[in-house]
Image: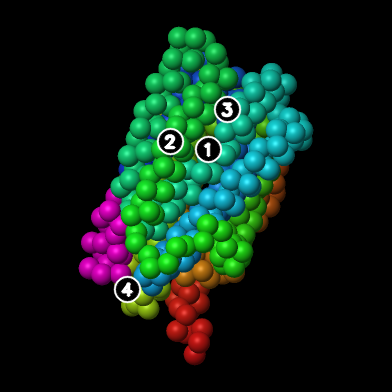
Amino acid sequence: MNKDLTTGKPAGVLLRFTLPMLLSVAFQQLYNIADSVIAGKFAGEDALAAVGASYPVTMIFMAVAFGMNIGISVVISQLFGAKDFKEMKTAAYTGFISVAVLGVVLTVVGTVLCEPILRMLGTPENIMEDTTLYLAIYIWGLLFLFIYNISSGVFTSLGDSKTPLWFLIASSVGNIVLDAVFVIIFHWGVGGVAWATFLAQGVASACAFWAVLRRLKSIETKEKPALFSGAMLRRISIVAIPSILQQSFVSVGNLCIQGLVNGFGSSAIAGYSAGVKLNTFATTSLTALNNSVSSFTGQNIGAGKMERVRSGFKAGLVISFAVALVFMGAYVFCGENLLLLFMNSTSAEAIEIGKKFLLIVSLFYLFLALKLAADGVLRGAGAMVYFMITTFLDLILRVVLAFILAHPFGITGIWLSWPFGWIISSTLSLAFYLLGVWDPLKKKA
């Protein structure tokens, strides 16, 4: 099921490779949204606010998992494209060992700092206990999160976007069923939502890891690959560390914005929680396209086919625009109905806040689509300095403007900071792509 992305018509190859990844995102977001829907509908507005208040903190840990995923994926894609299967296996084994150690360390650190971080953010007292409980259980499952993300990254690097989809479908369905059992039947509240995610993710992680090991074993090599290589870890780290820092700074920025939102009360937190979950559905779908462009770029650079990289960018941009327009239409015309999935009609203030957030950000999804398509090429080529510049610019503008605009415009000012960051950073990402900073042939020249 490994797929060579260096042959065939780029647009068709990329589309077939991307569709399972989009479905994967859909199912992943389905169970993320299910957490909030079941919490809001069956445990109340405060429960929804508690899940939402913990979300920016969980994204810090996701940043580490995602950063490692990027580092390992880029290296494996390039080695697979170059047909260096021995080193490719070493990269995968080294990555798994590294994230296992990292997962244990962060579990300990996260458990100790969980409540202090929430208090630093000004989490309201009426949701503090539930928020702390949800976050603590989430942190205990970090090792599962890391292993699953690396497993998924290895599969997509080998050109196989279908296998991770099957694991996500099973995990999503299991998570939703457990949510219903723990919250609706057992009345465990926020704790039930957290344990459902913990168990579903744990099983998916173990199955995905087993499947990756079998897949790697099926690829024949003349020599036995090393289980761990310091040199390979350094190569992975060159891409992973900037990615982790980039994702972490984004998460810290989200924490700052969450802190601002917290100051407007639990109804604002609930509205933002529902709105940001829907927004995340759109952004992660576009990020999945970004990941497919990265894998496509990595394999073709490894094979020395630069013109295919350009064709892949154009095809990826067209697909990204199509996806962005679908989400834009859904949130502009059906935003209130979608928010009612999370809350009862009695939560009028929270619904109005979430509706305005969705309207403002969704109108600018085309700029985000452009940025992520260009970033996919930069990241797949390992041009991490340029990738980080565009992302940090987006983050800095968004956070600084959120604080500036919140004073004269209230909570609406916070939402207005998103479009400014996307417009400016997308322009810079496109400029870097057009300048060819990703092309190793231009670097040598």
User: Residue 327 or 91: which is nearer the viewer?
Assistant: 91
Q: What span is in magenta? A: 1-19
Residue under label 3: 51
Find out whether the residues at labels 1 and 3 contact each other: C-beta distance under 8 Å. Answer: no
| Foreground disc of the pair 3, 2 | 2
Q: Which mark is residue 144?
A: 1
For disc 3, the neighbor class at 10 Å (few under 14, some 14 to 19, many from 20) is many
Name the mark nearer the viewer: 4 or 2.
2
Residue 382 locus on image (x, y percent)? 51, 69
In what element is the residue under mark 3?
A: helix
Per the image, is 16 magenta? Answer: yes
Question: Residue at the location (30% across, 57% down)?
Answer: 2
Nearest to the eye among marks 1 and 3: give it: 1
The first of marks 1 and 2 along the sequence is 1
Q: Position of residue 88 (x, y in %)?
A: 44, 63
- Residues at marks 1 and 2, CA–CA distance in whole angstroms: 8 Å
Q: CA distance from mark 3 to mark 2?
A: 22 Å
